[in-house]
Image: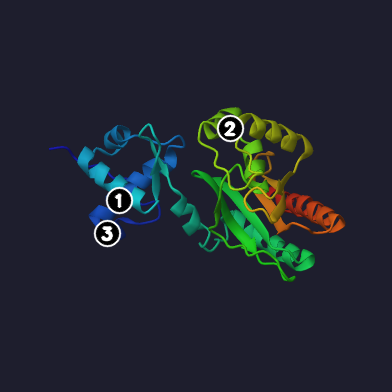
Amino acid sequence: MRKTRTVAPRSMDAAAIQHTIPAIDRMMSVLSVLEDQRDGASITALTTALVLPRSTIYRILNTLEVHDVVQRDGSGIYRLGQRLRKLAAHVPSGAAELDLAALAQPFLDQIAISAGHSVKLSVLEGGGVLVLAAAQGRRPYALGVTPGQQMPINAGAAGKLLFAFEPPERQADWLSRPLSAFTSRTVTDPKRLKAEATRIRRQGWAQDRGESAPSIYAYAAPIRDHSGRVLAALSIPFLHGTESEQAENIRHAVISVAHEISTALSG
């Protein structure tokens, strides 16, 4: 009979472990292995790593996939899913923990007050873009934004910007997937999206002209860590028909505040 190996919880002592639920321990062991495997893992790899029966691993993964805690690609590789990102967006920040959403929130609140428009902090997750944090604008007709909203990568300023700063191999992966159209302006041609990504990298910001909804425009700018790697996109959506001078002020505000958040991350 094979001996089961589990990954011990990282913040529990031996006495506490004695009072845990074995099924949940096995589930957390699976998640712990996936956490350490950036490129994901197959059922076979998980079975080998945890010395658990294949049927047990399959049932755990199937249950987690139903709840979007893990996701499986076409080749049978499992990765951590979007539900974890949504849950993490509501976790209070610890004193010694770098929490991008918590760090950025005061900046988002301030720009929502000063500009009057709603503002979003978005990241790439799973099959698209996830709003990690947001602040609601105060002016009339400010568009509604909430954490947990999901958007496609090819329709919107934030998605296109995040795509633009992905490594070439990740871009190729994104472009191998179908690009859905939401309006007549949605970019669905992979060559056109790649060309736009080149322009976005060169100019340092992205624009949406009614790509996800005909009446919604937006600007987005990158948020970087101390090494210059793009972690997230800051964006402000606004209604089509906004005066050109005001739209230009929104663009400058997005670029400026994204830089401020990046500086705070590097501090």
Q: Residue at 68% of width from left, 39% of height from top?
A: 227
Q: Is residue 51 left or right of residue 198?
A: left
Q: Position of residue 230 (x, y in %)?
A: 65, 42
Q: Nearer the viewer, mark 3 or mark 2?
A: 2
The residue where tag 3 is placed is: 20
Say what secondary structure mark 1 lies in. Answer: helix
Q: Position of residue 10 (x, y in %)?
A: 39, 51
Q: Quadrant of the N terminus?
A: top left
Residue lying at the far front of the rendered structure: 184
Amino acid at the residue labelled 1: Thr
Amino acid at the residue labelled 2: Gln
Toward the viewer: 247 or 30? 247
- Which mark sits nearer the N-terminus, 3 or 2? 3
Q: Which mark is residue 140?
A: none
Q: Quadrant of residue 238?
A: bottom right
Say what secondary structure mark 3 lies in. Answer: loop
Question: Circle 1: is it few (<14), some (14-19), or many (20+) Cα within 10 Å?
Answer: some
| Disc 2/disc 1 C-alpha distance (Å) | 30 Å
For the question of whether residue 165 can be seen, the reply is no
Q: Which mark is residue 63?
A: 1
Q: Quadrant of residue 45?
A: top left
Specify how the rendered protein is coloured: rainbow
The residue where tag 2 is placed is: 171
Q: Residue at 77% of width from left, 50% of height from top?
A: 255
Residue lying at the far left of the rendered structure: 1
| Disc 3/disc 2 C-alpha distance (Å) | 42 Å
Toward the viewer: 218 or 228? 218
Q: Position of residue 98 (x, y in %)?
A: 59, 53
Question: Circle 3: is it few (<14), some (14-19), or many (20+) Cα within 10 Å?
Answer: few
Q: Nearer the viewer, mark 1 or mark 3?
A: 1
Q: Residue at 83% of width from left, 53% of height from top?
A: 248
